[in-house]
Image (cartoon, helix red, strand yellow):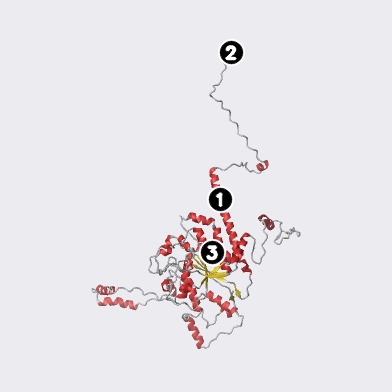
Amino acid sequence: MAEPTTSAPSGVSQKAAPKPPPPPKPQNPALRMLGLPNIRFKLPSRNWLIFLSITGSFTTALVYDRRQKRRAQEKWSNLVAHIANEPLRTNEARRKLTIFLAAPPGDGLRSAREYFKEYIKPILVAGALDYEVLEGRREGDVRAAVANRIRKTRRQAGEGQPIEEDEADNFLQQIRQNFGIEDEPVIKGDVDQWMRPPLNQKPPIEEDEADNFLQQIRQNFGIEDEPVIKGDVVIGRHTWKEYIRGIHEGWLGPMDAPAPEPEASPSPDASPIDAASQPASGDDASPTSSEQPQDNKEAEPTPEKTPEEKKKEEKKPSGPTPAYIFPAAYPSQQLAPSIPQEIDVSPVAFPHILGFLNTPIRIYRFLTQRYLADAIGRDVATIVLAASTRPYAENNNGIDSEFAASANGTTDDASPSSSSSSSSPQLPSKHYEQQTLLESEEQEWPKSVRKQKEHPDIKEREWLDDVVVDSRIASRMRRFELPAEEEDRAQRIGEGTEWIRGEEMPVHIPAWKRIWNTYGWGEEDDGRPKVVIGNLDEEDGE
């Protein structure tokens, strides 16, 4: 009898045995002998892909922006580079600009200096121009510096009272005149001739010794300035408002500081009370005892203080020089006779925003510095070329600049300073272009700057008060303008079809070839093959 066969149930599927993993690919024997591990390339994980994509995108945007920023600065630098090759006479000094720079509201002076060195200085250096920077650390410093420079110019022109000399110099000069003592005549070309000024020549007031020394050297050697327009450069809206106040104070204000306001005298009721309280304390005491301390006080001599102690007691000024004149008095003042016919000054934008909530805006500006470099480079190149000037427009209610409009995307219908309470007179709607220039920057100032300081000595706030312009000075102000032909030439330079005026465009050399020519056996700068000579004399290189 046959045995029944056992079969597995049909519902249960037999699982196949798992296949063993494939053996790893053998490593290259050469790499294995070098001790390198067997690295297998595989796709990164999700977290690594997120990290690499974010960092890679940010790095790419940053590198691209800095490359375009460098190209924009090179474009405007090459536009003005031909000025550096223009010859000068031996007794002629290069054109000199005056840069007015102040710490932005809510920040220090370091940020303003870095902005000047990064965006403005490269264009000035390319044009080989001389410049002088006047810095202001606090509100009002630039205004005081501008007014002092103008008053010094007016004194040199003969306005104001004669300059007073020191008592020691007057005494010594009087003795020399009484005894008939004269200076030994010096030979022409002697060092004393340009180091020692004549006795009858008085240095201008408020001028440093270094300026006196330099001015005396220039006069004795016949050094003259280049016969071109000099001009002033004002950086930022806050500096521009102080500059406008300074030129009005200098050309309309008095030459000497006004008398300080008298201090408030004590009330008349206080003196009788004090007088009555003094004898009341001495009613119980004898007359001899009350008179004796007074005699002792009169007998004791007060010790004289040394000059060093007096200098220590003298406190440093807590702020800039107070204003000699306020905007309300502009119409009643006479214009100085020595004022020039044209005041050449051009403002330069200084966008500066602070605050944690403004971090997205700051990141966007950090990655788009190429637009700022192109806009600032154009303004500075216009000043360096000085090809043409134009008067500031009147009845101007437009936006201050194209860059500000494109960066912010809003119109400046009202300024924060217009709503602030100030001591300046309430004038009608803004008439002059000077009042609306760079006005969009005020919207980015921190709130702490707009708070009025409750201090009796502060009668005005240059940053918060409205810009008040006198028509006599506003009509003399000029602004540099870039001609259309220079604009077209700058565009051709940016496209690579033109180069510095008077020079041929250099041939483009790839990076690998520059490295080979510099460190390898490539060619010299003039195209000749580099000669490689061995150690023929068997020297050891010492």
Tag 1 and tag 2, C-beta contact below 8 Å: no
The residue sitting at 54% across, 63% down in the picture is 376
Which badge, 2 or 3, comes first in the chain's sequence?
A: 2
x, y percent for residue 349: 51, 63
Q: Amino acid at mark 1?
A: Ser
Note whether residue 30 is visible: yes
Furthest residue in direction top, as rendered: 1
Q: Answer with left or right where residue 506 lies relative to residue 320.
A: right
Q: Dot 2: what SS?
A: loop
Mark number, residue 185: none
x, y percent for residue 142: 48, 69
Furthest residue in direction left, as rendered: 284
Q: Residues within 10 Å of mark 3 (few under 14, many from 20)?
A: some
Q: Reply above or below: 316 against 175.
A: above
Q: Amino acid at mark 3?
A: Phe
Q: Quadrant of the N terminus?
A: top right
In the foreground, 479 or 273: 479
Q: Dot 3: what SS?
A: helix
Q: Amino acid at mark 2?
A: Ala
Residue depth check, mark 3 versus mark 1: number of the one nearer the observer: 1
Identify the residue position indicated by label 1 in the image. 57
In the foreground, 432 or 415: 432
Q: Reply above or below: 3 against 72.
A: above
Identify the residue position indicated by label 3 in the image. 116
Tag 2 and tag 3, C-beta contact below 8 Å: no
Tag 3 and tag 1, C-beta contact below 8 Å: no
